[in-house]
Amino acid sequence: MTIGTFSPHMESHIEGFSVIGELKWRAWDGIVADLWDVTCTEGARGRYMAPYPRLFMPLSIDGDGTFKLSGKRAEHDFRAPAGQSLSYIPANYPTRSRATGITRIRHMDLHLSEAAIQRRFGKALSRDRLETPRLVLDDPRISVLANMIAETLETEAADHRIYLEGLGNALLALLFEVKQEPRRRRPALSRAQLSQAVEYIHANCCDPLRLSELAELVGLSETYFSHAFKAAAGVAPHRYVMQARVRQAQKLLCESEASAGSIAAQCGFADQAHFNRVFRSIVGTSPAAWKREQQT
């Protein structure tokens, strides 16, 4: 599969592992998460290498034995109960696996776009943390976030991109120990940059809009763009997008008899309840009350 310019293809050679059922996966903002359920014959083994960083996390292990993941100078024996320990594998780092005394393993792989990670965190990202393998990774905070992502895949819940982006950002910040940069006054966007960003927002406000799109449009990192946009426009980019959607919704409320639910969908809101909350926070009243006021 290819997500934007990120193509999560991994070289692998396996013996004794058989996939059960269909692969479940999600992709968002430089992360591809997939959920595997496999049976294991005694001594099942594999060799793997990928051109991108990834996280490996067993979710459940059947049997009293171990699933061993080994690298150049490190290894990790995963045992039941699973779901508490992970392995971080940097790009182009070869690993091997071997199943001893287990019959089945469910695991999640998180494939990470290095370019997206660098774009997201900029200079706050340590190259050393990105390139250092950690086959034994026991951080309960990361485990909780990874399990929440796995639960979304397992239940095939509706794809709430903001929810997944939040989990992914928190996990990556912990994984790479991203430090908050000291607060300093950043210059605002230039008049030309602001105009370019605002025009793009108004033209695409009803579609899913990512901060990375807007930052790339004017050639800035996401963090820098977010601060510079707020300094120039007076509100954060996300708030400005919501304001643009509400203005479009107001136009539809005046010009059509479409239901609030239909207008919410047309203007890019998650659902009618989301539409109502955002509308009230910006306009000060509900869409229905505002429409009645315009008709009097």
Image (cartoon, grey):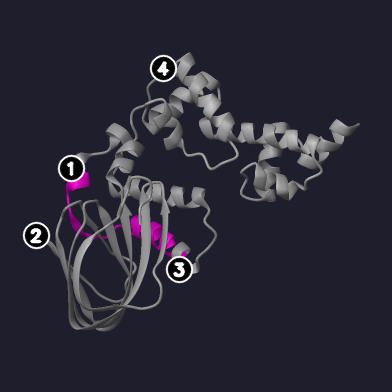
> Which residues make up the magenta segment?
128-151
Q: Quadrant of the image for the C terminus?
A: top right
Q: Give coordinates of residue 101: x percent, y percent.
A: 21, 84
Q: Quadrant of the image for the N terminus?
A: bottom left
- Does residue 155 appear to the left or right of 44 in the view shown? right
Q: Residues within 10 Å of mark 4 (few under 14, many from 20)?
A: few
Question: In the rendered image of this protein, does residue 196 appear above or below residue 135?
Answer: above
The residue positioned 25% from the left and 52% from the top of the image is 53
Q: Give coordinates of residue 82: x percent, y percent.
A: 32, 72
- Return the residue at label 3: 154
Residue 8 falls in image quadrant: bottom left
246 or 224, which is in the foreground? Answer: 246
How far apart marks 4 and 3 lie (CA) works out to: 44 Å
Rendered image: mark on residue 187: 4
Under mark 3, the amino acid is Glu
Question: In the rendered image of this protein, does residue 282 appear above or below residue 273?
Answer: above
Q: Give coordinates of residue 88: x percent, y percent.
A: 24, 56
- Return the residue at label 2: 72
How far apart marks 4 and 2 lie (CA) works out to: 46 Å
Label 4 or label 2, whichever comes before in sequence order: 2
- Return the residue at label 1: 128
Under mark 4, the amino acid is Pro
Q: Is residue 119 magenta?
A: no
Count up the numbered dots. 4
Q: Give coordinates of residue 267: x percent, y percent.
A: 65, 41
Label 3 or label 1, whichever comes before in sequence order: 1
Return the residue found at the far left. Answer: 73
Q: Name the mark nearer the viewer: 4 or 3.
A: 3
